Image: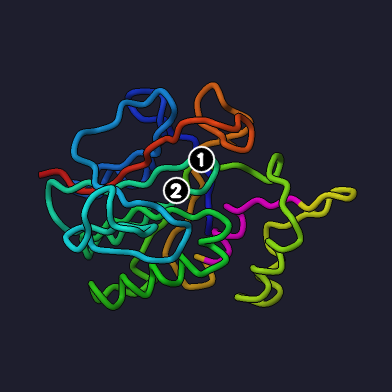
Amino acid sequence: MPTSSSSRSRCDVSWAVARWVSVAGLEQSFGGRRDATPAGVATLRQVHGRRLYDVTDSRSAETEGDGLATVQRGSLVGVWTADCVPVHLVAPRGGVAAAVHCGWRGTAAGMIPAALEFFGRRYGIPPSQVEAALGPAIGGCCYEVGLEVRAAFRSRVGQPLGEVGFTVRGDRLVLDLRTFLVAELAGFGVAHVEIVGPCTACHTDLLYSYRKEGSTGRQLSWIGWRA
């Protein structure tokens, strides 16, 4: 069952998944605007798509894509966000960790099924052995979207899943993207899913929010394995 958590890391400006502390060698954090960036985190040139790579098949900050996975000790991977959902995927028994960038466009395009398919194809790991955590992102309290967004979700996944996370408030349509992602991950049989951290737009003292602030920075969420 999905759960919600607000566990804070030891630096008290980022968010960690409490249940993953027991995963041997795993390092993980959803960063905030005051969080120090660890050295050596591999990233991608994010394009709001659905491409995932093993870290050995990419050039950090240059390869276009929206997800990186690693099985290497001493390797960290990360994604930058400022309202989109940073998703961390871990297969504890298989020793695989991934950071995935899920905005509405990438989600509508199928970033999550693409990532789970990659886990199976590259590492032989089924969804039932994967756990997921969704970090701080803009919530349904603040995220007004157009009708074309809901249409894109419906086009890929149909109903009723294509309605999950969408709410009509008066003449406005709002989206809680993390709610949709929880439902989608659970539908694929992912072993455990949880939400970590608050709405970015509600907490700009701690987090960057493009929707709330306009021109702003990005926070790095990272995961990987100690050497």
Q: Nearer the viewer, residue 143 or 124?
A: 143
Residue 33, compared with residue 45, is above or below; it is: above
Q: Which residue is mark 1?
A: 136
Q: In screen coordinates, is 201 left or right of 111?
A: right
Query: For mark 2, what is the residue?
Result: 86
Task: Classify 13 as above or below 173.
Answer: above
Q: Give x and y (percent) for residue 85.
A: 50, 49
Residue 31 image offset from top left, x and y in percent: 39, 34
Point 49% across, 55% down: residue: 102
For numbered disc 1, what is the local secondary structure? loop
Label 1 packing within 10 angstroms: few (<14), some (14-19), many (20+): many
Q: Amino acid at mark 1?
A: Pro
Residue located 42% across and 56% down the image: 132
Q: Which residues are magenta?
A: 174-184
Query: Which quadrant holds the C terminus?
Result: top left
Amino acid at circle 2: Pro
Q: Are marks 1 and 2 in contact (CB under 8 Å)?
A: yes
In the displayed structure image, the side of residue 175 where residue 191 appears, left or right: left
Q: Residue at x 38, y 66 (%)?
A: 51
Residue 181 part of the magenta-drawn span: yes
